[in-house]
Image: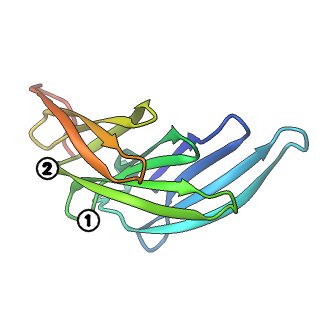
């Protein structure tokens, strides 16, 4: 099993996937779905570096992606150091992908999720080995840089599970 994630970028059929390749790197791939011809076209790809996936059995839990408008998107994989790493990308008008900005979380994680709050903010929720969930909001500036806004740690007794 490998890490995979998908998110829409526009209402005109563009979407992005994040896929763990055979070298444990994260491949970011932009696509276009044409409903008239019932086809999918691969637009571009970008290798975003190594993933920190400790177990193939749980690989899908280690990467997430969300669109944030204007063909920009944020990918949130677990880094090789075990921390959450956010990266902003842009699908350019010529079909290429540009990396814009990055940020790193402060706590080791075991599972993660991300979603868009609006065109400038995303929220992540992660679980760690202590069975706590961490909810964090992030600001994505117009240049793609990412900064942490707020964090709330939810003390639980079973979040994340043992691996």
**Which residue has dot 1 on it?**
80
x, y percent for residue 129: 13, 44
Q: Is residue 15 visible?
A: yes
Q: Residues within 10 Å of mark 1 (few under 14, many from 20)?
A: some
x, y percent for residue 25: 43, 69
Q: Residue at x 54, y 44 (%)?
A: 6
In the rendered view, tell whether residue 91 sits above or below residue 113.
Answer: below
Helix, strand or loop at label 1? It is loop
Q: Residue at x 60, y 42 (%)?
A: 9
Q: Residue at x 19, y 42 (%)?
A: 162
- In terms of sequence position, does the residue under pointer 1 or pointer 2 come before the other? 1
Q: Are marks 1 and 2 in contact (CB under 8 Å)?
A: no
Q: Is residue 1 visible?
A: no
Helix, strand or loop at label 2? It is strand
In the rendered view, tell whether residue 159 sits above or below residue 100.
Answer: above
Lateral position of residue 43 relative to residue 148, left or right: right
Lateral position of residue 58 relative to residue 71, left or right: left
Q: Residue at x 68, y 57 (%)?
A: 93
Of residues 141 and 148, the one nearer the viewer is 141
- Observer-side mark, 1 or 2, equals 2
In the rendered view, tell whether residue 74 sits above or below residue 134.
Answer: below
**Which residue has dot 2 on it?**
106
Q: Residues within 10 Å of mark 2 (few under 14, many from 20)?
A: few
Quadrant of residue 13 in the image? top right
Quadrant of residue 61 in the image? top left
Of residues 42 and 5, the one nearer the viewer is 42
Q: CA distance from mark 1 to mark 2?
A: 14 Å
């Amino acid at each position: 099993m490998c890490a995979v994630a998908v998110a829409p970028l526009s209402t005109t059929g563009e979407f992005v996937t994040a896929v763990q390749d055979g070298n444990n790197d994260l491949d970011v791939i932009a696509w276009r779905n044409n409903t008239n011809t019932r086809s999918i076209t691969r637009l571009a790809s970008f290798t975003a570096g190594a993933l920190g996936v400790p177990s193939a059995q749980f690989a899908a839990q280690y990467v997430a992606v969300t669109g944030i408008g204007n063909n920009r998107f944020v990918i949130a994989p677990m880094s090789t150091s075990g921390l959450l790493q956010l990266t902003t990308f842009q699908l350019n008008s010529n079909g290429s992908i540009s990396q814009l900005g990055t940020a790193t979380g402060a706590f080791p994680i075991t599972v993660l999720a991300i979603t868009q709050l609006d065109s400038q903010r995303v929220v992540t929720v992660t679980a760690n080995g202590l069975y706590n969930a961490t909810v964090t909001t992030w600001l994505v500036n117009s240049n793609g840089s990412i900064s942490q806004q707020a964090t709330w740690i939810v003390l639980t007794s079973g979040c994340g599970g043992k691996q």
